[in-house]
Every structure is written in C-alpha cells, then in structure tokens.
Image: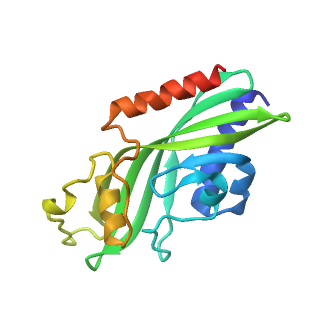
Amino acid sequence: MNDLSEIAQLVSRERMFRVRGNSEIANCYFSDATVATSWQSGPASEFIKAESTEVDYRFPIVGSISAPVIHLHGSKAFVELPTETRMRMVIKNVVVEIESFRRLIYRVEKRHNEWKIANMISINESDNLHPVIPGTQFKIDPEELIGYRPSYQFLSYVRQAAGGSISQDLLGTDRPDDVSRIYQQAEKWVNE
C-alpha cells in the first residue's frame, strides 16, 4: 500500500472509530498528539475519552465524511477532511437534530515506519437545527442567537440549552483570516 492510501485510511478510520465510540481510536494518534474541536482543546488522550456536553446518550451520533485531500511531502502530510455530524437531542420538549458541517485538518507523520495523527483541528463551516418529526413546532426567538457566530450558531445554541458553554473564538469560515492562518501553518509544517 502506498503512503497516500495509508493516510486516507488512517483519517477515515479515526472518524469511524470516533462516531462508533470505538476505543481503537487511540491507535490512530501519536501519544503526543493534540486536538482542537468545539468542545475540547488539548492532548488527544483527553479527546479520545471525552464527549461534548450536549450529547444525549439516548440518541446515536451519526457522522459522514467526504474524500480527503492529502498534501504529502516526505514523511509529513496535512489532510483536509470535510465532515458532517448529526446529533439528536430534546430541546424545549421537542426532539431536534443538529447537523454540523466542518472541515478537519489533520497533521499526520510517518514515525518508525507508521503513519499516525500528530494534530487535528476542526474548522466550523455551518450548521442547521430542525425538529425530527415533520410538522412539529419548534421555534427559536432570534434574540436567543445574538452573539453566536454564523459558522456554528446552532451548535452554540444547543450547547447553551444543554447547560454547557462554547467559546465564540473557535475556528470558523466566518473568520477567513483565521482559517487562512491554519492553512499557512499546516503548509509550513509539512514542508519543514
């Protein structure tokens, strides 16, 4: 198998294991790896064993991924992986589903002849929130969304409704300069 195939399989396995809650996800990361998502920023070991506060364990999390774009240079690569996650929960006594679109940027390395993830960062692109049962009334007062950024406003809303909080300084496509900086850093890293 060539390096590009190994890298594509690695990031696909990581997403599959994450959505399924499979403990084998740890094998996808180096022990010194870091992760930054909407609900966790720090060592990958913390990310692997944690869940975000808005997860309602009565409902499974459903995720899908698109084909990865791999930027390979020697024993390093950064990978862009578009993803979609759907989670159901109960808000205002209505079963709703949040659909979040993000782009994951992985930095992967080949150490000791094995590709693993050294870093993963999530870029929020957009989200939707709707009732699961067609015809069900679910209303949000637009005032409740004030202060939430458009790239993840409904994720912010449901996190708050679940009793949690979320930073309004996360990476998002509504702040293109921040996203551009992440790509510049990834390109610099891969070419070091």
* Quarter holding residue 146: bottom left
Colouring of the image: rainbow
* Quarter holding residue 95: bottom left
Residue 156: percent from left, percent from top? 33, 58
Residue 158: percent from left, percent from top? 33, 65
Q: Quadrant of the C terminus?
A: top right
Looking at the image, residue 188 lies above or below residue 101 = above
**In-front residue for pair 67/24:** 24
Residue 16: percent from left, percent from top? 62, 53
Residue at horizontal 71 percent and vertical 32 percent from the top: 5
**In-front residue for pair 148/94:** 148
Looking at the image, residue 76 lies above or below residue 96 = above
Residue at horizontal 85 percent and vertical 35 percent from the top: 112
**In-front residue for pair 166/135:** 166
- Left or right of residue 82, residue 98 in this image: left
- Left or right of residue 119, residue 95 in this image: left
